[in-house]
Image (cartoon, grey):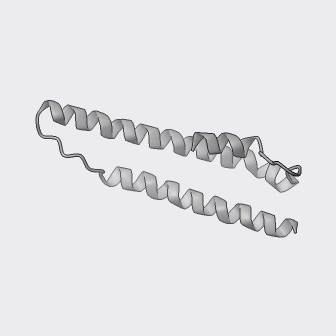
Amino acid sequence: MAIVSVAIIVSFHLKNQPSHIEMRVSLPVGLLFWVLSVACLANGLANYVKTVVKYGRRRALVQSGWKTQVVFTVVACAIIAVCVLFLSTQAKMR
């Protein structure tokens, strides 16, 4: 997701220049994806630390909790919303 955020921020295009709308939206959307990637990384690290601590007590049960489900639901909703946004701006350009 961090790589996607950088690609969105720099408005990566192969054939043509980005439109004014894409240039205006690219920074906030790129930052949003960067924040979401850091949230996923923090969530994974927290799950790892919790599992290692429980392994030390010999009571480990590896599973995701409600916090993980919330983070990944937010990530999925953001991806869907950005796809709709990009498709709608592309449709207006044609």
- Residue 49: x percent and y percent? 29, 33
Q: Which quadrant would residue 53 be assigned to in this image?
A: top left
Residue in the picture at 29% in, 52% down:
65
Q: Which quadrant would residue 46 be assigned to in this image?
A: top left
Q: Nearer the viewer, residue 55 or 50?
A: 55
For this view, does 11 lie left or right of residue 28? Answer: right
For this view, does 89 lie left or right of residue 30? Answer: right
Residue in the picture at 35% in, 50% down:
67
For the N terminus, which image quadrant? Answer: top right
For this view, does 90 lie left or right of residue 56? Answer: right
Q: Which quadrant would residue 27 be assigned to in this image?
A: top right
Residue in the picture at 24% in, 38% down:
51
Q: Does residue 36 sit above or below 70 in this rendering? A: above
- Residue 36: x percent and y percent? 53, 45
- Residue 2: x percent and y percent? 59, 40
For the C terminus, which image quadrant? Answer: bottom right
Residue in the picture at 73% in, 65% down:
87
